[in-house]
Amino acid sequence: TRQMSKSNDREEFVRTTLRELVVYILFLIILCILTFGSASSSMYYYTKVLSDLFLDAPFPETRNTFRGSTQVLDIWRFMENVMEDGLYWEHWYNPEKTPIETDDRNILYENKLLGIPRLRQIRVRNDSCEVHADFKNAIRQCYAVYSDNAIDKQPFGLMNGTEWTYNSPEALGGGIPYWGKIATYGAGGSFADLGSNRNITNVILVNLRKNLWIERGTRAVFVDFTVYNANINLFCVVKLVFELPATGGVVPSWTFRTVKLLRYVTGFDYFIMACEFIFIFFILYYIIEECIEIRMLKCSYFNSLSNVLDVTVILLALVCIGFSIYSTLTISDTLEKMLRDPTKFADFEFLGYGQAHYNSAVAVCVFFAWLKLFKYISFNKTMTQLSSTLSRCAKDMLSFAVMFFIVFFAYAQLGFLLFGTQVYDFHTFLGATFTLLRTILGDFNFHEIEEANRILGPIFFLTYVFFVFFVLLNMFLAIINDTYSEVKAEIANQRNEFEIGDYFKRGYNN
Amino acid sequence: TRQMSKSNDREEFVRTTLRELVVYILFLIILCILTFGSASSSMYYYTKVLSDLFLDAPFPETRNTFRGSTQVLDIWRFMENVMEDGLYWEHWYNPEKTPIETDDRNILYENKLLGIPRLRQIRVRNDSCEVHADFKNAIRQCYAVYSDNAIDKQPFGLMNGTEWTYNSPEALGGGIPYWGKIATYGAGGSFADLGSNRNITNVILVNLRKNLWIERGTRAVFVDFTVYNANINLFCVVKLVFELPATGGVVPSWTFRTVKLLRYVTGFDYFIMACEFIFIFFILYYIIEECIEIRMLKCSYFNSLSNVLDVTVILLALVCIGFSIYSTLTISDTLEKMLRDPTKFADFEFLGYGQAHYNSAVAVCVFFAWLKLFKYISFNKTMTQLSSTLSRCAKDMLSFAVMFFIVFFAYAQLGFLLFGTQVYDFHTFLGATFTLLRTILGDFNFHEIEEANRILGPIFFLTYVFFVFFVLLNMFLAIINDTYSEVKAEIANQRNEFEIGDYFKRGYNN
Amino acid sequence: TRQMSKSNDREEFVRTTLRELVVYILFLIILCILTFGSASSSMYYYTKVLSDLFLDAPFPETRNTFRGSTQVLDIWRFMENVMEDGLYWEHWYNPEKTPIETDDRNILYENKLLGIPRLRQIRVRNDSCEVHADFKNAIRQCYAVYSDNAIDKQPFGLMNGTEWTYNSPEALGGGIPYWGKIATYGAGGSFADLGSNRNITNVILVNLRKNLWIERGTRAVFVDFTVYNANINLFCVVKLVFELPATGGVVPSWTFRTVKLLRYVTGFDYFIMACEFIFIFFILYYIIEECIEIRMLKCSYFNSLSNVLDVTVILLALVCIGFSIYSTLTISDTLEKMLRDPTKFADFEFLGYGQAHYNSAVAVCVFFAWLKLFKYISFNKTMTQLSSTLSRCAKDMLSFAVMFFIVFFAYAQLGFLLFGTQVYDFHTFLGATFTLLRTILGDFNFHEIEEANRILGPIFFLTYVFFVFFVLLNMFLAIINDTYSEVKAEIANQRNEFEIGDYFKRGYNN
Amino acid sequence: TRQMSKSNDREEFVRTTLRELVVYILFLIILCILTFGSASSSMYYYTKVLSDLFLDAPFPETRNTFRGSTQVLDIWRFMENVMEDGLYWEHWYNPEKTPIETDDRNILYENKLLGIPRLRQIRVRNDSCEVHADFKNAIRQCYAVYSDNAIDKQPFGLMNGTEWTYNSPEALGGGIPYWGKIATYGAGGSFADLGSNRNITNVILVNLRKNLWIERGTRAVFVDFTVYNANINLFCVVKLVFELPATGGVVPSWTFRTVKLLRYVTGFDYFIMACEFIFIFFILYYIIEECIEIRMLKCSYFNSLSNVLDVTVILLALVCIGFSIYSTLTISDTLEKMLRDPTKFADFEFLGYGQAHYNSAVAVCVFFAWLKLFKYISFNKTMTQLSSTLSRCAKDMLSFAVMFFIVFFAYAQLGFLLFGTQVYDFHTFLGATFTLLRTILGDFNFHEIEEANRILGPIFFLTYVFFVFFVLLNMFLAIINDTYSEVKAEIANQRNEFEIGDYFKRGYNN
Ligand SMILES: [Ca+2]
């Protein structure tokens, strides 16, 4: 009878878990509908056609492109040719060049430019760094690497207008600092709003160029605009950046944030809305459940990885719900304001930025939600065998990972110091780390490190491959292999417990 | 004596299997003759020279190519230059430009253009989607993503002729929907048949361009033609497609179906025909055999993987035989019709499509036929050891594969949601899956995912490589390794059975 | 005492082997001097500068190159621009274009053109294949794929001179058939010897072009010449080939055979000569040794892999010695003939071809000679452990390799049939095999096979990676792993034998 | 009590080691501050913008670049266009071309050219090699491969001035020989100092060109200059080299040494200086410690790998300290001299060379310092298990490595001899070795070796992959795997010793 009652307990346990599993799978399905429902491959093509248009179109004479820009002259070549061509579509393609009506002028015929684009630059002072005593006579001006303290807030050039004076970030509508390749730039600076047609813009640009708008102190030039495609109801918030490092030259970068800001337009959108409500109820349900559990288990609650996962998922979900509500409320306002005066700059930066991070948060949330499934699969015996192999070798793996990463980071530092001045892949310590990781997978450029240092380069590569790829990596395998043998031997000796499979079999037999 | 009778049974069994094996190998040889006989490396070169001609030839001014087309203007540049150059070869290469006689004008001097090419487009209505309330005033037209419901069936532009009206797929000869990169397009639309020489075609194209044939509603433009090379007796059914997604811009795609539609011309072709008859007899023989087996074993017949393989091979073979007969019968008709009036469009689409799928079916059939060989190699002891290792660890492998793929798909979804709007390799969920699979093999682009998301990109990559490449992948090895040790130990303890090798030895000794 | 005598025997054995080893190492050193002495990195740069000059120089208008040629027009563009520029260096680079003296006109200022270049083509008859009945009216000429039977031996075009008539291979000096990408071409055909300066050559080429020298039947056009660089005493025998497949279009190929035909010029060369004599004595010594062994062991001699290796090395060495003597004797003759009349074509094809194969034979010979070292390393205990692991698992490995290659070739055939008409890497069965091998190492192009077949392509890739990379490849590891454990356990239980190490230790102690 | 005293001993030992560890970690931190403090990602961008400017800018007509130069003409194209554009920035970018003041003319607006650039060439005699008897009449001049003996020290061309006469290395300021791709070139030769503005330089270059400065004997042309960026306080010592091999043609190479020669300018620099003093004290401390240890242990000191590491680190540190002091003292002198007369060539070669090697020495020093950490981690039990696995299998690994490398080098030699004349990756024996190593990781070019030898190429690849990748590589794994199992089994049977973890626990409990 004791056996029997134990078996009954087990059965009860299985039944409870099954119920939980079913509820959880429903939750997962809703979550997947939400995420896949708001993503579409149109988004990729939208980003692509716009980046083809601005980043890959060749400048007329030099056949260089935005991506390949290396000099100040390339900035002007880009702005006066490719950018103007890309922004203003005033004619059809036919030989007679039929003009397009003013309010039908869309980028690539389909994408409405919202408001007008804004050109902005940020400059540093000409005394922002110290010149070494020996050079004090020969070199009188020194423009530091960008930092907020070095910003030049004095007027320059023509000394008047927003183009030639400094405007604080607040005056510019409180933008977000831009994380570039060289530095993170503040949201202030001098700006020029371009025109609503090609002629006006060209006049503005020529004037800027003539008066040497970009000068030695310029550290970054930004072009900001937003387009909206009504066909697929997507916004693209575009930011094209030329960074001018203190070394001279130009380093281009960009962001194309393709986001769905108007969430509810078509019938399917309203179905998604329904799912969102169900999702909120699920989250409330799980919050209550976890609260109960926390009250019961107190501190020990956080000892279980699975509980930490639960809490993470819930927190992420709450953040997403919050932003989602905020965004739905504010977008209408912004749009209204912008559409009232289409000759002003339309600042979608914050909405685009927020939406992009919202999407990331949702993505991570779904990822963790999937991983939680592992909690439920431990019923099956072979599954147990595998997951217990993993958990048992975790300690050894971690110890080994410490050894592995000491060697790994020693190599990364060596690589950074030896090749960092010559090879892009090693130009930061973190970058060097990833480069070495990619080397293990077979993605590396031997000739570059050989060129950077013809003796130490090959030696570095050879010893790295030998110790890390031939020896250390195989240790991971040895650890797993050995643990698996042990676990399998143990489990083979165990008695079969009542399994989830049995539950179904019994239900089938009765 | 019991031992002896058992040995005799065994011998009998071996003898039967050997006979079966010999028959099977004959079958395989015939099958290989059939498939290799109808494939030749000429086919590859045929596809190559034609795609070089149309896809990679640069447009005169911009040096862009068909493959690199991104704008509507590129469509016209392609059609009025590269396409006309490629289709009409009216002069020799010498400085005097000796004209070539009209009926000797072949593409690349060797390939006869069958009939004339057809230009087709398919459009959607300007009210096919809903504009959000806020934009109703600013945006009055909305052209949806292509779908069969959104097709615009009204005349447009000049309002007359096949170019400016909608023609149903039936009116166009019942073509096959085209599966493009963005959508699957119906076979209807507006079309223009081009001319049989360069002048006529040029007039038609300029007229279309002048009257703005391609407009905002256009979702795809097709160019269809077929060429025949008598030297190597091959057809190439060419379809060049420009998709115009709702995002604006142009996405080019293409199919070059190089097929052998006239199957029996040379002496070798008739030898193949003989083999085909033998093949049919073999198939009949195997059908009968399997029928007998099914009658004997009933449902349990389908429990064996090897039997399922047999049935698959037979079914594929029957489909192939069927299409083969149909194609041989209809091709003459089509050719006759086409050759009677060479100024009409020659529609080889269905034949090309069918033949390509026929070739695929044959290929898969041969693949399965090879795999069936495994049924016969189990006689050798070491072989058994290996195949029984594989079959024994199959269960564990599958259990593990479930775990593996939960993690794998969780990563694929994460990658799709995080990078899908920026990176081609992640722009669909399925694509993301294959990208992650390729990452394991070392084919990935780290810089792209880093650019798409500078924080989550590297974290994604690092954790993926660590968990999947370092840990999970090694589990596969651990499972196989452990099972192999077990199996080897077991087999080493077994008594040697009468083997196929012994059979030959005995035959040799007597 | 028995123990002692056994130990003495063992010692004797060790002493003999050591002596053999020392002799063998001497032999290896001589061999290495011979091979490394006649190879230099100058050879690579010689090939490189010449191929840069002819293969990668852009044509003036189209910026295409020899490598990128796809049409008949590209042949003429190449010959009238890049080839003429490359062959005739009549001026210095300065603005006044100072002419260079006639007998100092060297390619790239350093390389003497030996004799004059030869242009040759080979054509097939216009009735060399059969046209299908349906097309008999529309298509009257059929030019088959190249084969020796299809060669057109009738005069054509201007009907006179070597350019317009067929010349047999014998009449042309008995050249070697050329193994191209499409076919293997005979050494006969129509040829034109170009001029010794740019003007003459240009007149010849324009005349050929004007009279349509290249016509539909042309299957290959060859340009042959030889250059000699006195600075580094190297010849480069150049052959530039345009194949014109029956599909139309052009497929370029080339050989640059950089060889050292004048073997003895500098002092170091005579040192090499001395080594060559020593080498011959070594070979004689080994021949005698092996003969004795063969007489002793009879047939069982060939059972040992190591003996087979010996014989192979000796045979290869004999072939090399033979050619070496022949070449040294004939080169002077050829040179003398050529230098007597520098306005004739200098045929170095056979010497270049032979020397290149001689180099290959030497390379393979050295490779096998190195492998023979394994015979001697079996003295050390740990070495034994490793080599006996390899030899013991050889049988299992082979059995498994059979299974592996059935699957492998089934996939190769599937890939060939599915993607062969579209993807270069699968366009022959053998090519497909290597493509699949490279896939295992991580070198593949997924997008190409996806484009070739959007459904079966990814399935093919997925199943291949799963079965071959995840499962079958790991079996190799499992086999080695298991065998190693066994062998190690066994050896740990063995008594230490008298080892080579002990021999040295004893010598050292006494 | 005995147990207790042993435990106390152990505790004592742990305490000592912990103290050592803490000191060592302090040392490591100082070291990291030093190295990371003097490296910055600005250095990479500095190298990049300069190499973009000189190496990747296209020549006006041919669109070729410095990197792609293959002919003598390209040298002039580079110097008269790209180099002049890059060195002299005399106008702003605006349409009116506002001139920049003379002492503000900076490369890329930011980088001061120090002194003036120097053009140098080195030539060999026209009788520096022997022509074969057969060619003695046809070829009268022979220019050997570069070697110090072959240098032509006679005047040439206009016969006067430094451009047309030979100057010994000493006369040129005692430079460092340049290790090029083809040879290592001496520091002497004929040189021309260019002008301080574009016009002067252009006159000099045209004059050189007109008088055929580069002639057949020229083996290398060097352009040397140094730029200084005050914004980031970095020097870049630039050397652009055209090697003219004896084969004809041109092989470009370059060095951009971005170094921080003025070490102490900003506040942070002085913090680094403080760290440097601390570092020196640490080194003194370790020197004393090691001296004591050496006195105690005598010869046996060097038996421990860890001690050898210590000595290496100390020696490297001493070298670095030495150079650091020397460089700080000499740089001021050099700068002063240079700034006094800005129209002379400023020779920073030795300082740049030294600083670059100093950086390498520091990097290696830090690397070894990190590895020494392993000495301390052996306290933890799982760590011991792993490190003892590695040390125990070291002997087997080495034995196996010998076998592995015999096969490996046999393949490298075969590859070098078979493909060396055609494929860059195999053009030296050492290069071939690395190519084969990269092949294991999946980075190879199959098509190149296939093209170089269509039969032996694929066979080479196939057998290499099979024996080395499938078989030998797996042996490494088998060895590690087996050893790990053994070690783990042993350790599991051991009694737990007092561990470092316990020490902390006790501290925590009391
Ligand atoms: Ca790889």
Image (spheres, coloured by chain):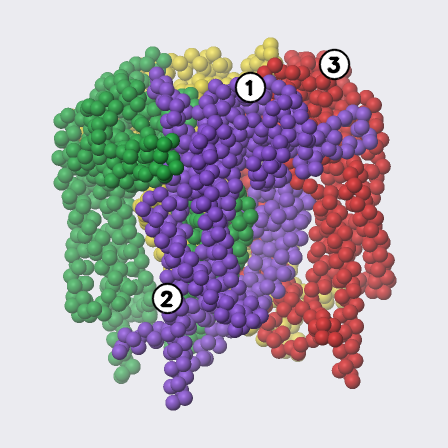
Chain colours: A green, B yellow, C red, D purple
Most extreme residue toward the top is B96
Could you tell me which secondary element the residue under label 1 belongs to?
helix
Given residues D225 and B442, the one toward you in this image is D225
Residue A256 is situated, as x and y percent measured from the top left of the image, at: 30, 36
Q: CA distance from mark 2 to mark 3?
A: 95 Å
Given residues C210 and B388, the one toward you in this image is C210
Instruction: Tell me the residue at 59%/20% (across/down).
Output: D209
Could you tell me which secondary element the residue under label 3 belongs to?
loop
Q: Amino acid at mark 2?
A: Val
Instruction: Tell me the residue at 62%/48% (across/down).
Output: D430
Q: Is residue B457 above or below residue D245?
A: below
Judged left or right of residue B427, residue C109 is right
Could you tell me which secondary element the residue under label 2 belongs to?
helix
Residue topped by disc 3:
C159
Q: Residues within 10 Å of mark 2 (few under 14, many from 20)?
A: few
Label 2 within 8 A of ligand 1 by Cβ:
no
Q: Chain of mark 3?
A: C
Q: CA distance from mark 1 to mark 2?
A: 66 Å
Given residues C372 and D72, the one toward you in this image is D72
Q: Earlier in the sequence, mark 1 or mark 2?
A: 2
Q: Is residue C446 above or below residue B88?
A: below
Judged left or right of residue C218, residue B447 is left
Given residues C475 and A6, the one toward you in this image is C475
Instruction: Tell me the residue at 67%/68% (across/down).
Output: C380
Which disc, if any, is residue D22?
2
Q: Amino acid at mark 3?
A: Met
Q: Residues within 10 Å of mark 3 (few under 14, many from 20)?
A: few
Judged left or right of residue A261, residue C375 is right
Q: Amino acid at mark 1?
A: Val
